[in-house]
Image (spheres, rainbow, N blue to C red):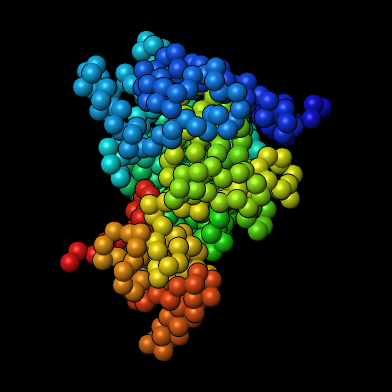
Amino acid sequence: MKKEKKYWNEKIETMASEKMKALQWKRLKEQLQYNYDNSVYYREQKFHKVGLTPEKIQTFEDFQKIPLRTKDEHRWTQEESLRRYGHPYGLITCAPIEKIIRINSTSGTTGQPTLYTLTQNDINVLNEMHARKYWRCGLRPGNIVLQALSLSMFTGGLPLSDGLQAMGLCVVPVGIEGGTRRVLEFTLLTRPDVLIATPSFGEYLIEQAPKLIDKEANELGIRWFFCAGEPGAGIPALRKKIQEGFGAKVFDHTGGGHAFHGISCDIEPYAGMHFVSPDHCILELISPETKDPIAISNGAVGEMVFTFISWQGGPLMRYALGDLVQIFTEPCQCGWPEMRFKILGRADDMLIVKGVNIYPAAIKGVVGEFMPRTTGVLRIMLDSPGPLVKSLLRIRVEYGAEVMGDDEKQKLIREMTQRMRDQLRVTPSIELVPPHSLPRESGKTSLIEIRET
């Protein structure tokens, strides 16, 4: 009997570090020449602006002289292309338009959607990355995956469906557009054993299943839950809630329609996500304040910058997305070989409270430690957009159904306040509100609410 492979692409996924670096450098040099030859924008705004050509880039330090690209600049190139060419692809795309076979997009929840142009080569790369992630977690042809994310052209929609199908999995792309009841009814009808959703929607399904279909979530047969769009497995209380609520293994993962992909393992404590796409994506860290490079080393923290390699359509180069990550280069106890990362939060989500930097996910982690005395649901109430919190940090938290009477509520407030003071070095004002009184959303849920004055 043939032994089943441990990795989808063992040659690449277990490649020694020095060999991988050599492969990255070879592909980077080829990609730089490709970007220079095929994009007026890259040639004029990124190379010539600092006196570079591909031939002058002989070291990685030379490469890091290329100016960063941001989401705002990405949107600007789309608008400028519309003015110049009558379509948004002239400046962001390197491949001939006849080779572009799909356009992906961000949701545009924080501004104009940013577009990603893909050739068949690029789609093949995406499918390979999805297969690497799900294969490691034990998914095989025969598994049925219910995709409870926003579908259509978004990076967690069609690209994810394609990747799952390409490795032989059965996909139920029910999405979230039809509402919670529809997701639960299709779960009963199609009998998936894998669910992909935001963790906040997973929490909501656990709460709503008994009300809407007269079944507990752990009766639905879900054995794997993949968190998308928000941290989930990395927040211990939330991970436990989903594990017990569905009776499933819980994984964080990232990477929809681009080349940066990661997947967590299932060891305790949470060890971050394994970076599974180094042969198609080069990762850098920079200082969020100065934008200077930060060396990749164990425990290093910085803003993530990535560059696609062996990519044809719209290859992102030194793209600063705004996510802050922590890197781990020491071997993981699970045995998977590559470096890992934890997404700490978005740079624009960071709050500064009396000189202390704090991320909403960290607050959610502390509140979750008090479940079931809390539901785990909260909102951070701000008078104006961050990062600077000029007044007292105010948090609304749903108390659990078993918390009765003012004495119990006051005790809960005191304990949570002390825990946040000890762990996060902030002393908030906590307001308890009844269970299920704060809105639940099926997509990404913002923990921050700006109060109108």
Quadrant where the C terminus is found in the figure: bottom left
Determine whether 350 is above or below 61 in the image.
below
- Residue in front for this viewpoint, 211 or 241: 241
Residue drawn at (49%, 19%), measured in percent from left and top?
Answer: 53
Quadrant where the N terminus is found in the figure: top right
Task: Tell which residue pokes out farthest to the left in this image.
Answer: 453
Residue drawn at (47%, 30%), measured in percent from left and top?
Answer: 66
Asked which quadrant contains residue 175, the reply is top left
Task: Tell which residue pokes out farthest to the front in this image.
Answer: 51
Q: How many marks?
A: 0
Q: On the rendered structure, is 249 left or right of 211?
A: right
From this viewpoint, is residue 14 visible? no
Residue 147 percent location from the top left of the image:
45, 39
Q: On the rendered structure, is 410 left or right of 82?
A: right
Residue 248 percent location from the top left of the image:
58, 52
Determine whether 150 is above or below 24 in the image.
below
Q: On the rendered structure, is 379 left or right of 371?
A: left
